[in-house]
Structure formats: C-alpha cells, structure tokens
Amino acid sequence: MQKWEYLRLDVTYNDRTIHSGIYNVVLNGKEMSSKEESKSWDALQLYVNSLGEQGWELVSHAKSDYHEVLYFKRTMLDAKRSQSDATRE
C-alpha cells in the first residue's frame, strides 16, 4: 500500500494585496526565517521549486484576504530518496 507524507506551507501577506509583500512564511507550524530576504517572492518561488525537486507535489491551495495555505504530498519512498541525496552532499 502506498504511504504518503504531507507538508503545509502558510504564506501571510502584509495586507489584502499580494503585491504588498510577504509578512511571514510558516512550514508545518514553524516560521521559516525572520530574515527579510527570505520573505521575498523570488525566495518563495525558489523554495517551492526546491520542494518539487525533493518529490513534493502541490495537491491543494486555499486563499483568504491575507493568507494562503499550500498543501503538498510525496510518497514515503521520495522522502527516503531525498534524505539519502542530502547525506551525499
């Protein structure tokens, strides 16, 4: 039977428009970084791309006025591969 693991990425904006900038980014309940450069759109895109390289697939997205939630999943096999790749580097 296929086994999955899930990841939740929360993005909160400074105000109702996404153009105002990112207030914070939270990964599975933990703030990713308090550094301002990590709260840029470019940094967020690079991070989401790195999730794809690690086998994560976006499966759901929800949005409200100031907040977006992105849900990803990957097989447990992809998780093991990603860990072994990290130990080789």
Image: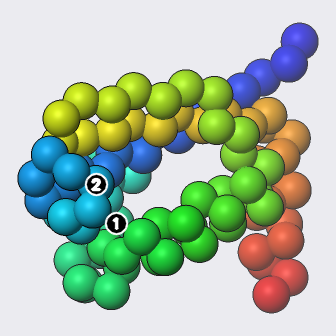
Residue at 76 percent of width and 75 percent of height: 86
Q: Is residue 5 left or right of residue 7?
A: right
Residue at 86 percent of width and 82 percent of height: 88
The label on residue 23 is: none
Q: Which residue is mark 1?
A: 32
Q: Amino acid at mark 2?
A: Ile
Q: Position of residue 8 (x, y in %)?
A: 45, 39
Q: Which residue is mark 2?
A: 18
Closer to the camera in the image, 19 or 8: 19
Closer to the camera in the image, 65 or 80: 65
Closer to the N terminus: mark 1 or mark 2? 2
Foreground label between 1 and 2: 2
Mark 1: few/some/many CA within 10 Å (<14, 14-19, 20+): some
Q: Position of residue 73 (x, y in %)?
A: 66, 34
Furthest residue in direction top, as rendered: 1
Q: Amino acid at mark 1?
A: Met
Vertical arrangement, residue 19 with respect to residue 87, above or below: above
Vertical arrangement, residue 83 with respect to residue 58, above or below: below
Q: Is residue 54 left or right of residue 36?
A: right
Mark 2: few/some/many CA within 10 Å (<14, 14-19, 20+): some
Residue 66 quadrant:
top left
Alpha-carbon span between mark 1 and mark 2: 19 Å
Whether pointer 1 and pointer 2 mark residues with C-beta atoms closer than 8 Å, the reply is no
Closer to the camera in the image, 19 or 83: 19
Residue at 24 percent of width and 84 percent of height: 36
Q: Is residue 5 visible?
A: no
Q: Describe the element under mark 1 as helix, strand or loop.
A: loop
